Amino acid sequence: MLEYIQVGKKIYNMENPREVHRFIVFFIRCMLHPHRMRRLQDFFQSTPILAQIADTYGFVYEQPTRAFFYNKSTFQERAQIVEEHMTYLTQHLEGTWVLNLYRGKSMLLWQSQDEGEPMELCLSYHPGQRKEGLLSVVLYLGRDALYQMMFWIAKDKQGEWSMWLGAMQGPNMENARDVIKKVTKRCHAYRTKNLILHATQEVAKALKLHHIYAVTNYGYYANNHVRVDRKLKTNFSQFWEESGGTPCEDKRFYSLPLTEYRKTMEEIPTRKRANYRKRFALLDTIDKAILENLGGLVH
């Protein structure tokens, strides 16, 4: 009981009435699942690195208690996601890298080399993203985050380690359309949301994962992406299908390819081939950078 109070006071702002309410709800839900919470605590005390992660990022105890990750997820499923995600990271990356991610330090995956405003792809995490995942691939333009792909790592029904995409978020700025148009042109007519998915696929391969699954419209945890007019505007299912995805038996998920389909030059109209060559060259540069910067750390 005392541990939950200490964790709650650490992760919530007790001077904010809304946060105090969340603290109370968190404590009650912990008390309603004493055995599973004890197993979760034992898990995070099982190795020094896991203990440091829990001490740094106390939300690992909160996420199972809230209806996060996907529609109709259970307490047990959420706790298992947290455990499997952290197990995989700590077994395949050096502990310092994992700790840094949950201390708010991003890992640079790729950086633009042209003359425009700096663009970067990073692997990072922020507690504000915890509803949809446990890590993110982020596309930055200068200091602004244009697109973010939130995900977690867990086993699928066949027991194979997989990446699970909880959500994709686009730009939140007044001139978003103009910015996206400029970046799309700079990427040789390659849509920014396709770019963030492509980068995420390369991250999955660099992490040596076997599959990618993505939450559908039905599977989205909050069901607030179908406009009435809410913030999330992306039709997840449509985008996953456009990207080569296929529906899973569980209608909450799509299965996505690990590698984006690339047209051959014969499939491309002659007048567009020069632009496609530049686009493919950019993607090859990004792929190489992700493999070097992330893949070189994975064992």
Image (spheres, helix red, strand yellow):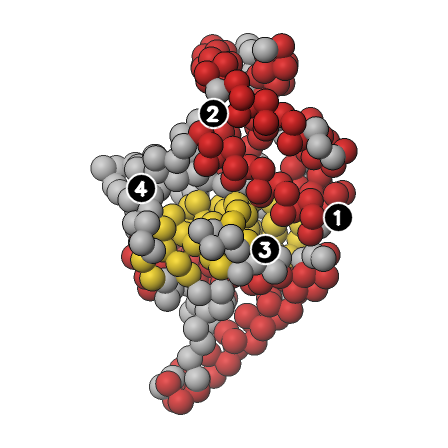
Q: Where is residue 33 in the image (x, y as percent from the top left)?
A: 48, 20
Distance between the Cα atoms at labels 3 and 4? 25 Å
Instruction: Kindly state the secondary structure of the residue where label 4 is placed.
Output: loop
On screen, residue 286 versus residue 257, left or right, reads right
Instruction: Residue 44: give its label.
Output: none
The numbered dot on residue 94 is 1
Identify the residue under disc 4: 225
Quadrant, the C terminus: bottom right
Question: Considering depth in this image, is 154 or 176 the residue closer to the camera?
Answer: 154
- SS at badge 3: strand
Q: Distance between the residues labelled 2 and 4?
A: 22 Å
Q: Can residue 147 be seen in this view?
A: no
First along the sequence among labels 1 and 3: 1
Crowding near the residue tagged with mark 2, few <14, some 14–19, many ≥20 C-alpha atoms within 10 Å: many
Question: Which sits earlier in the primary sequence, circle 1 or circle 4?
Answer: 1
Give residue 67's position: percent from left, percent from top: 40, 30
Q: In which quarter of the image is residue 103?
A: top right
